[in-house]
Amino acid sequence: MMLQQQQHVMQQRKRSFVTGLANIMAQRNMPLPPALTGTQIPGYDQNHSPWKSLEISPIDIGTVRLAGRDIDLFKLWGLVQQAGGSPKVTQQNMWNIFLPQFDLPEYLPGSQQSTALALAHYFKAIVGPFEEVYRKNFHNHGSGPMHGRTPSGPQGMSMSGSPQRPSGMPGTYSPNGAIPGAVGNNQSMMGMGSASHGLDSLGAGANGPFNTPNMSHTPQIPQLGMPNGSRMTPEARPGMPSSMSDTLLGAPSISRSHSSDPESRKRKMRESEEIDPKRVRQKTAGSDASEANLSAGLDRKSVPPSSTSMTGSIAPTRIRQPARRKIEYVPFARELDTHGGRDLDAVQKEHTRAARRHIKSLDEWGRVDIEALTLSLRSRLSTELSYALSTFTFISIMPGNHKDSGFPISQAPDLLEEVLDLIEDLAFDSVDDSSDIEDPPGPHIWTYRELSNSLVEEGLKHFAGLQSYQGAKNPELGPKQRPGDLILCAVNILRNLCNFPDNHEYMARHDRFLPILFRLCSLAPPDTKTSPRPASSSLSLADLLTLRKDTVNVLINVAGYVNLSSMSDSEEGILLAVRRAYETMASFLTDAVEAVPPFQSMMLHGLPPTVQHAKPSALADVTLEAFTRLLQPDENRRLAAEAVPQEWLWETMEALVHRLPVVDTDFQVIMRESWLAYIEKLVMAIYEIAFLAPPAVKRRIKTDRQLGFPKVLLRFVKKFTLQATPEMRSWFSVAVRRAIEAMKLIDDADSDSFDTSPQTSPMLTFGVGYGEHGESRIEKGMGLLSGYQEEITWGLMTNRDVDELIFQELESLVRIG
């Protein structure tokens, strides 16, 4: 019940806020669309409105859309006021802290424009006028000359004893979403000593919906008497614009007057002077009458005027000279705009301006001589390399004339050859990798996390910055780039070229492109005395980690066209390239700390369990995509089965099984689209490892009790078949089918998927084997799921959604004898 009341109050406050915002914008001749405010504005024309391009959310009033997300203006205004107001937020560049509140991306889709800048522009254009009126109202309310006075009013009117902080001011916003009213209950509005009770501010939405006050019942309070007998008009009131009430209420200004006693006003002024005697200033004898009248009110020795002074002028009084003077010297201090000699504000403005600048299209870049670019790379001169790599980098990221098109590298084969030659010369000094064929692979795959920890530990050692390390720049090179930086730049160009679909097939079928990338990602032969290091002497361990991530991103795009058998002329070279590719991808999957179920993966990355949009690890998801695409063709699987050591296959299978969901919380996490795709790729990778694994690895997977391969996959299958709704079954049908096929491959532990030797059997005599044509072979022994025969037979196999092929495989898995 309390929750419903709070929601009702919040809706009333929001409605009051939107109504006040609509009135203010209407006063400025910029009426907001009725679909946004819920208020019909007479004469509003959608075709000529400055807000016609504004995207309005149909969910609720006061809600616009930005980057595909709903932005509640009421909530945004409360968050900005809690942070100190939009001027402070803009000055401290804090608009990006509001992006997670509305699930906004860092950049707008399809452009490099910052979403935080767009959000600030929306706030300034729509809510900015409201905030300006709101702040001016609060400033005048807190600093008015009659601040703190208890006004008198007509009988029956309830007035507060002293002005209080409005409920809608900054600092009253609660994090639970209870955003305060727009302005608050201001008893002393815009610096006036007393205010009409009918002119409650927009914050009255906390007590009910916004209503324009009844003009006939507004109490009229006598105005202050002027020295010349005239009356103060609303236009002459200091600190209060005549249209302020109209702006806040959207109604004509109401004539109000002050019920102020001159004697009481002078008594208040004398009391304030006694509290702060420094306000008394020295007067000279030559002061005029007006100055004498003012000093009479400020003299703390003066007596209250007589009743005749109410209607006449005040008699001058002798000014008492102060006993002593206090002289204060304020030193002159220049504000420092620099920090450590650098103007950070100017640097930030330049960075923001560069980030807003759009990338030129390929036509705007002008004519670039590709032949000259090729010759610059071939020259190997420092200035020519700098020009060629910079120009080629810009060309590689420019979009083409139509969608999903870029620089056609297939039309410049010499340029690609020169980039690959440059990488080989800098990384390996044109040395062939034939010597690496003789080096046996290590028993363990160095994972990405282990290499990162090794890099951090090396940097934390004493005097680490003074020690030389592999890949560091040689001082004898002079003012030249480090070779590792040139290699990273060249690989970045190749990765950019692979982002365009027109270049996928050409780059995948190039005989040197992928072997060179895989060689760059390889490690030197293992040494027990030293930490792992790259095979190239020009690369550091940090460069190796960057290159491995770039290589995985390249494989995502081109893996569908890759034929591993065409990577080298020799069989040994092909197997070496396949082993390097497998090691590169497995380094992101086989880490024992990161290979955990979905729920534990969220906790490992610091995500709370209540996050609704949590996604799987980006590196693991991308690597699984590249892994499944590369090993999908049977020829690539055959080469992987020959090149990859058995210990690597077992380590990969163990890590993949550990990533599957096990407990109920894991299955609750994967009920999202991103996790569904992740699970499908994970099960597909398990199927591929089971397909290419030799019989020895299959038997180990089948019988290892600590791994529990049959139990984990059987629970996965049952969860999405027997214990799932029909809609959920359709979502996970592909993953369930692959899981059953993987269990069938592991069940045939004695068979090799690539064994093409002919089966020898005795010749059949006449009549033997009649009627067995087309029938499946008779299998003997205990099936992998024979212990769950009753549950699978009566629960899973009787399901009408199970097709004939899956039925036969389940029947084989539960066989007995």
Image (cartoon, grey):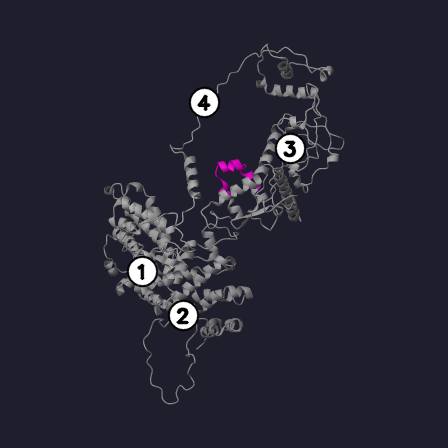
- Say which residue label 2 marks: 745
Looking at marks 1 and 4 on the same chain, the residue that comes earlier in the sequence is marked by: 4
Of residue 672 and residue 747, the one placed in the foreground of this image is 672
- Say which residue label 1 marks: 510
Which is closer to the viewer, label 3 or label 4?
Answer: 3
Looking at marks 1 and 2 on the same chain, the residue that comes earlier in the sequence is marked by: 1
Which is closer to the viewer, label 2 or label 4?
Answer: 4
- Say which residue label 3 marks: 243
User: Residue 332 got which mark?
Assistant: 4
Which is closer to the viewer, label 1 or label 2?
Answer: 1
Say which residue appears at 58% left-offset and 50% top-offset.
Answer: 57
Q: Calculate the distance from the C-alpha at mark 1 to the C-alpha at mark 2.
A: 34 Å
> Start and end of the magenta stretch?
77-97
Q: Calculate the distance from the C-alpha at mark 3 to the C-alpha at mark 4.
A: 41 Å
> Mark 4 falls on what kind of element?
loop
Of residue 680 and residue 404, the one placed in the foreground of this image is 404
> Mark 1 falls on what kind of element?
loop
For badge 2, the amino acid type reads: Leu
For badge 4, the amino acid type reads: Phe
Labels 1 and 4 touching (C-beta < 8 A): no
